[in-house]
Each structure stands twice: as C-alpha cells, then as structure tokens.
Image (tube, rainbow, N blue to C red):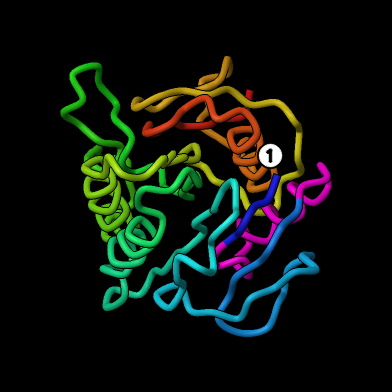
Amino acid sequence: MKIAVVCSNGRVGKLVVSEALERGHEVTAFARNENKSEAKKFVARDILEITADDLKGFDAVVDAFGTWAPETLPLHSKTLMHLCDVLSGSTTRLLIVGGAGSLYVNAEHTVHVMDTPEFPASYKPLASAQAKALEELRKRDDVNWTFISPACDFRADDPKTGKYIVGGEELIVNGAGESIISYADYAAAMVDEIEKGAHIKQRIGVCRA
C-alpha cells in the first residue's frame, strides 16, 4: 500500500513510518524541515500547505500532528480540517493519532476521561483541543477517517509486545485493569488498521493486552 505520514518527525510518526516500512509498504514522509524518519521518500511541507496533488494516489494518510503550547492548541482542529478538505471526496483514508482524554468512561457517553478527578489538570487543555477536533471530524461525511485513541498511560519507551486489544468510544482496560500502551504497539495498531480498514468513520481505542 502507498502510505503518507504527515508530521513524520514526531515520536509516534517515526514509529508508524518504521512499522509500515517493515511490512513492505511504500511510505512517504511529510514534515516541515529535514527528514528524521526512516522513509526514503520525503516531502518538505508544512501540514497547512499540503495540497490534493501532494496526497493524490495514496491509499492512506496518517495525521500524526501534535502540539502542546496553549497558543497553538487550536491547530489540532485547523490542521485536521485542512487535511479533510484536501482529501474530500477521494477514496484515500485518513487515520488520526488521537488522545485518550476524549474517550468515555460511562455507557451513556456523558463523561470523558478528561472529566474525571484523576485526570491531570495540566493535560486537560490538550485533551480538550483533541476532543474538539474529533467533534468536528464526526461531522465530515466526505472523508474516510479513523480516529485512534491510545490508552491513558501512553508510554514512549516501552517495547513493542505485538499484543493489544481494540475498543470503541469507551475507555478499555486489560485483564490486569490497566490502561497502558506503548508508542510501538500503538504504531502497530495504526498500521493494522490501515491494512484492514475495519473502522471507517469511527473512533477506536487501543490498549495493551
């Protein structure tokens, strides 16, 4: 498959590139500056400057954009809607690296993880920005999107286990009652979803088994 990874220099973006290459996919990395991923094909392009021609012919586009500074948090919605506009009406799938804060903790879907007392206050602005982007994404019928939320404990340096479970809108935990996943297992789940296309126009969550 032909896969584009946008914002490929981030830690998750680089792992998605590596995972897809390892499986034999043709990967093109997109980033503002130099290529820091393992991709041999690279396009130096700011995410807001990406055009329909740039993404023409790809089977899937991974949006690995992330920002944490308070003044840049609105870019989560702005950049995602830009990619949706670029891909509007095409068959190319858009897969988004999301957050855990917007997952629900009750069956009625009235309380998010970020609304619980245990959720760190310092992370709430980011979680709210990602939740807003997801809310806007849900309104798009013209894009084949999939939003993938990690577990609450998203571990950058943990190894890849190759074992994870998939949930839907609600927070899931493993048999030990833990909500944990490594960046490496998350990247594997992302590429699995690219290959299988099992959750079109859905948000899913992934957790270490």
- 38 sits left or right of 164 in the view: right
Give the image location of residue 137, x and y in percent. Answer: 28, 47
Give the image location of residue 146, x and y in percent. Answer: 44, 39
Residue 163 shows in this picture: yes
Give the image location of residue 166, x and y in percent. Answer: 53, 24
Question: Could you tell me which residue is drawn at 38 percent across and 31 percent down?
Answer: 202
Q: Quadrant of the N terminus?
A: top right
- Amino acid type assigned to the residue bearing label 1 in the image: Ala
Seen in the picture, residue 100 relative to 129 is either above or below; the reply is: above
Give the magenta part as a residue range: 6-25
- 56 sits left or right of 162 in the view: left
Seen in the picture, residue 37 relative to 120 is either above or below; the reply is: below
Question: Could you tell me which residue is drawn at 22 percent across and 49 percent down?
Answer: 136
Q: Quadrant of the C terminus?
A: top right
Seen in the picture, residue 31 relative to 169 is either above or below; the reply is: below
Magenta: main secondary structure = helix
Question: Could you tell me which residue is drawn at 26 percent across and 40 percent down?
Answer: 138
Mark 1, secondary structure of its residue:
helix
Q: Can you identify the residue that label 1 sits on? A: 188
Give the image location of residue 181, x and y in percent. Answer: 60, 38
Count of numbered circles on the image: 1
| Residue 10 inside the magenta-drawn segment | yes
